[in-house]
Every structure is written in C-alpha cells, then in structure tokens.
Amino acid sequence: MQRYFPIILICLTLGLAPFFPEPHIVGKLRWIWGGAKGMTLLDWGDTLMHGAPWVILLFYLMRDIFKKIRTD
C-alpha cells in the first residue's frame, strides 16, 4: 500500500481537481460519452492531464495483480 501512496495522492489531487461543483475529469468524461461535440485540442489535453494519474494507477494495479497470479 505504501508504494501506491504517491500515485493515489496524485489521483486524489490532480486527477479530481477542481472538486466543486464536480470533479473536472467527471465533466470531461461526460462530455466525451455525450459525443465530444465542441471539444477543442485544449479540452482533449485537459482530459489527458486529469486522466493520466488514473490510467497510471490502473496500470500499476493490473501489473501487480498479474505478477501475483503468475507467482501463485
């Protein structure tokens, strides 16, 4: 758990900021799921910036899970 602390901290700060009225990444994902009409390159970059910590966390978790499965 301690090795995940930095990436979890980044997910909870950069990945969710700004927090009110809703996390920024949630709004961007809704926009994309709604067809992404009107999204500019800046919006896509913003989505990448706020989404990257979550992708990295998912990668680390999957890597460790597969490593655990292989050793058992």
Image (cartoon, rainbow, N blue to C red):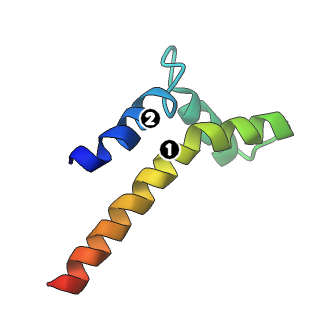
> Which of the labelled discs sits on residue 35, or is there none?
none
Residue type highlighted by circle 1: Pro
Measured as percent of width and height from the top left, residue 8 is found at: 36, 39
The earlier-in-sequence mark between 1 and 2 is: 2
**Residue at image point 30% right, 40% down:** 5
At 50% from the left and 22% from the top, the residue drawn is 22
Residue pointed to by mark 2: 10
Residue sitting at x 28%, y 49%: 3
Q: Determine the secondary structure under disc 2.
A: helix
Q: Looking at the image, which residue sits at the far top?
A: 20
Residue sitting nearer the eye, 46 or 36: 46
Judge whether residue 39 can be spotted in this image.
Answer: no
Residue 32 falls in image quadrant:
top right
Left or right of 72: which side holds 36?
right
Question: Is 21 located above or below residue 12 in the figure?
Answer: above
When the figure is inspected, residue 13 is found, relative to residue 37, above or below; the finding is above
Cβ atoms under marks 1 and 2 closer than 8 Å: yes
Q: Counting other residues with Cα less than 10 Å from the Cα at mark 1, is it few (<14), some (14-19), or many (20 or more)?
A: many
Q: Position of residue 39 (x, y in %)?
A: 81, 38
Residue assigned mark 1:
53
Structural crowding at the residue carrying mark 2, measured as other residues with C-alpha within 10 Å and reported as few (<14), some (14–19) or many (≥20): some
Say left or right for 36 vs 21.
Answer: right
Between the C-alphas of marks 1 and 2, the distance is 6 Å
At mark 1, the secondary structure is helix
Identify the residue shown where x is 28% and y is 76%: 67
Kind of residue at disc 2: Ile
Task: Report x, y in % for residue 24.
Answer: 57, 27
